[in-house]
Image (cartoon, rainbow, N blue to C red):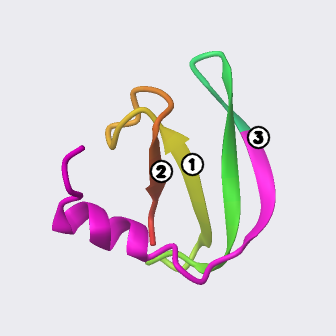
Amino acid sequence: MSAPTKIERDHYAKLVGRQITAIIWEEMEGQALPILLLTGRDRDGNAATAAVLMDPEGNGPGHLDHNL
């Protein structure tokens, strides 16, 4: 296993201390996509959310995406 990059460490560190308050179900390419509603706000002042995607580009499930 390779070590996480600084970008990866910084990306996931922004989730520390937050709590999941609800799950919002959306649709992605015909499949259910759970959006985790988190405590606090994102960097744009909107409700903080996270979703599991395939990669940062959002091609499918696998990468924990957020805008924190």
What kind of element bears circle 2? strand
Asked whether residue 63 is drawn in magenta, I would say no
The amino acid at mark 3 is Trp
Residue 32 position in % (x across, y down): 71, 28
At label 2, the amino acid type is Leu
The answer to which image quadrant residue 20 occupies is bottom right
Which labelled disc corresponds to residue 36?
Answer: none
Of the residues under marks 3 and 2, which one precedes in the sequence?
3
Q: Is residue 27 above or below residue 34?
A: above
Residue 56, image x and y in percent?
A: 33, 43
Q: What label does residue 51 carry, if any? A: 1
Between 60 and 5, which is closer to the camera in this rendering? 5
Tag 2–tag 1 contact (CB < 8 Å)? yes
The residue that label 2 is drawn on is 64
Residue 48: x and y in percent read 60, 70
Q: Residues within 10 Å of mark 3 (few under 14, many from 20)?
A: few
